[in-house]
Structure formats: structure tokens, C-alpha cells
Image (cartoon, rainbow, N blue to C red):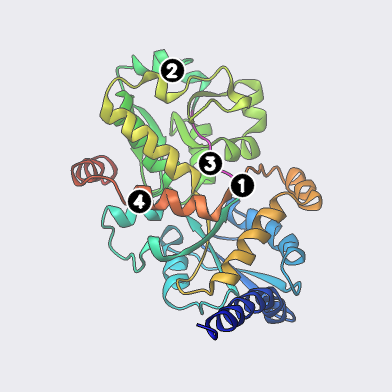
């Protein structure tokens, strides 16, 4: 009994010393190192611009102030990048992936080619939840959501392929949840091609994020040439106070479940994640650095200049949302497959 107290004291002292040394070890690790960001989309797009802006500022918020580099690894709607981060990137805290959050749902739906388990990534965070909206050309004669709901012919909107959240999955969810007459025309290479198709009259409208619309259609929206008729938000976007919100037009429990799933997917659209097995102290450091960057005045000034909105979602909250998506019941998942995977 006499030896138990000294032994306990030694254990406590050892724990305190070890805990105190962890930040020093991390600082020593990152000093002189380079953190590599891998973006799953091409240079110049929204994912790329967000990442390059973050990369220019995040290093000063990491102990040891490492440098950063951004590489693009395109293919399969960022699936190649996600697979690389999961299977090939070293789990050492020096490689951060940026890919689309819709891949989480695609795993639940059993998409071929997915070589990861989204529950095992170490999520760093998200710079802002996406704000989904749908807009149509003024000369279609559809000037309100009520007119759209009453349309006898489906409104044609552009898409790339199933799994593209903003342009493909969200519109199909709206079609099922609201009975909204629309038809997603897949096969466009990207949103720029879709915009041209809308402007030429090939398409009647487009669903995408409000952030993208503001950056690419500012004059058309201001003039009313393009009219935003619907948004999909937990609460209305402050800049879209007069635009109807989808949840207010849903009449069934299944429809509400679809809209709430859309909220979750939108919240994690711009994902940043680390390989499974990354040391926990480095995960903590990078999560903290990400959130500190989001509040960095110099970063915010550059983001404003680039028309990038910010409202960050912390890594632990991302993890909770991912887990929630994996808790969807089998019968609802089967229904989702019918809605989101055209035959």
C-alpha cells in the first residue's frame, strides 16, 4: 500500500508530461514540411478556388508553419481523388483531399468504383454549406414556383451525371418530394456548358448552388433574365428572402425526409478530409487550423474579393452528418436508388 501512492503519482506525472509534449512533437513534425492539397476537380472551378485560397493562409495557423501546395486530380466527379486519399495517400497529416460530399451518399447507394468507407476518413471541415437553388429563363413564361408546379410540360434543366449533387441529385429529389415538373438532361461537361445551354434556349433552367449563380450569373439575375424560383435550405438564405423554400411545399413524410437529406448533402458538399489512420494529434491540429483560417481577416478579405462565402462546418460535425447518412433505412435507400439512378 505504501508504494501505491508514489506509483500513482508517477503515472499522473508521466501522463501530464506526455500530454504536454504532444504539441511540441507536432510542431517539430510540421516544421519544414509541405502539406499537399489534392482537389478532385479542375483548376479554376469552385472547389479549386476555395482550396487555393485556403492553402495560401492555413500554414500560419499550423505549428511549425509548413508550406502548402495544391494539385488537381480530376476524374469521375472527384471519385478518383477520394479513392487516392483513402488508399494511397500516406496517413501522416501531410495530404488533405477536397472532393464532393455527394460521394458519401453514393457509397450508401452502392455506386460502382467507390473504394473507400466514408466513415473512416478523418474529416477536417467544410468552408460553407452549399445553398441549392433552381432558376429558369424569364422568357419561358414561368415566373413563380406556383406556375412551375402547374406546368403541363417538364422544365428541362442541365446535369452532368447521377451523383453530381447540385445539378443532378437535388433536382431529382425536388421532383420526387414536390411533384415538381422537371427533366434533368444529363451529359453536360460542367456548369459553364449548362449556362450556355440555358442562355441559348436549349435548356429552360438550371439547378445549382446560389454561390455559383452569384459568381457566374450576377448580371442576368440582377436584370431578371434568369429568375431564381426555388431554394432548398433549413432556413431561407438571407439574400433570397422572397424566394420560396422547398420544405414549405412538401406534403408527405417521405418528401420531408428527401428534403432533410438534401440539407445534409449540401452541408458537406465541399469536403476536406484526411486518410484513415492519420495520427489523432495531427487531425486535431489541422481541424483547428482550418477553423482558425476561416476566421483569419486576411483570408476573409481574399475570399470576399474572390466572391467566396464562408460559414464553416467543423470536422466533428461533418463526421456526425456522415454517420447520419449511413443510418438511412434500407427501404428509403431503395427509394433513393429509384429517384437518383435513372434507368
Spatial distance from mark 3 to mark 1, Cα to Cα? 11 Å
Spatial distance from mark 4 to mark 3, Cα to Cα? 16 Å
* Mark nearer the viewer, 1 or 4: 1
- The tally of labels here is 4
Secondary structure at badge 1 equals loop
Can you give x and y, in whole percent of width and height, for residue 270 in the image?
Answer: 53, 51
The answer to which of 88 and 47 lies nearer the viewer is 88
* Mark nearer the viewer, 3 or 2: 3
Mark 3: give few (<14), some (14-19) or many (20+) Cα within 10 Å. Answer: many
Residue 33 as seen in the image, left or right of residue 275:
right
The disc, 3 or 2, on the residue closer to the chain's N-terminal end is 3
Q: Which residue lies under the disc numbered 2?
A: 145
Above or below, comparing residue 6 to residue 343 in the picture: below
Q: Is residue 93 one of those drawn in magenta?
A: no
Above or below, comparing residue 237 to residue 127 in the picture: above
* Residue interval drawn in magenta: 128-134
Q: Which residue lies under the disc numbered 1?
A: 312
Q: Which residue lies under the disc numbered 3?
A: 130
Q: Is residue 162 visible?
A: no
Q: Is residue 70 visible?
A: yes
Can you give x and y, in whole percent of width and height, for residue 268 in the image?
Answer: 49, 48
The answer to which of 177 and 341 lies nearer the viewer is 177
Amino acid at each position: 500500500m505504501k508504494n501505491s501512492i508514489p506509483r500513482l503519482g508517477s503515472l499522473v506525472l508521466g501522463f501530464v508530461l506526455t500530454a504536454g509534449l504532444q504539441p511540441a512533437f507536432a510542431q517539430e513534425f510540421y516544421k519544414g514540411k509541405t502539406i499537399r492539397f489534392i482537389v478532385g476537380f479542375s483548376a479554376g472551378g469552385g472547389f479549386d478556388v476555395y482550396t487555393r485560397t485556403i492553402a495560401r493562409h492555413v500554414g500560419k495557423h499550423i505549428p511549425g508553419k509548413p508550406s502548402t501546395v495544391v494539385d488537381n486530380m480530376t476524374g469521375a466527379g472527384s471519385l478518383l481523388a477520394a479513392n487516392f486519399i483513402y488508399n494511397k495517400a500516406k496517413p501522416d497529416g501531410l495530404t488533405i483531399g477536397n472532393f464532393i460530399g455527394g460521394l458519401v451518399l453514393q457509397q450508401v447507394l452502392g455506386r460502382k468504383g467507390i473504394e473507400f468507407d466514408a466513415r473512416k476518413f478523418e474529416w477536417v471541415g467544410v468552408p460553407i454549406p452549399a445553398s441549392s437553388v433552381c432558376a429558369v429563363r424569364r422568357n419561358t413564361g414561368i415566373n413563380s414556383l406556383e406556375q412551375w408546379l402547374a406546368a403541363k410540360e417538364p422544365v428541362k434543366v442541365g446535369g452532368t451525371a447521377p451523383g453530381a449533387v447540385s445539378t443532378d441529385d437535388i433536382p431529382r429529389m425536388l421532383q420526387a418530394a414536390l411533384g415538381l415538373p422537371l427533366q434533368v438532361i444529363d451529359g453536360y461537361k460542367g456548369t459553364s456548358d449548362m449556362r450556355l445551354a440555358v442562355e441559348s434556349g436549349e435548356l429552360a433552367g438550371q439547378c445549382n448552388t446560389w454561390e455559383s449563380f452569384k459568381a457566374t450569373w450576377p448580371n442576368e439575375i440582377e436584370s431578371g433574365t434568369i429568375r431564381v424560383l426555388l431554394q432548398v435550405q433549413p432556413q431561407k438564405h438571407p439574400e433570397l428572402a422572397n424566394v420560396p423554400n422547398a420544405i414549405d411545399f412538401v406534403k408527405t413524410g417521405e418528401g420531408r425526409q428527401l428534403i432533410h437529406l438534401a440539407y445534409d448533402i449540401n452541408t458537406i458538399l465541399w469536403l476536406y478530409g484526411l486518410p484513415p489512420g492519420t495520427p489523432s494529434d495531427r487531425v486535431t491540429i489541422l481541424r483547428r487550423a482550418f477553423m482558425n483560417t476561416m476566421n483569419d481577416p486576411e483570408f476573409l478579405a481574399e475570399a470576399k474579393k474572390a466572391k467566396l462565402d464562408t460559414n464553416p462546418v467543423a470536422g466533428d460535425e461533418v463526421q456526425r452528418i456522415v454517420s447520419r447518412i449511413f443510418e438511412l433505412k434500407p427501404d428509403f435507400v431503395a427509394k433513393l436508388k429509384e429517384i437518383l439512378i435513372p434507368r
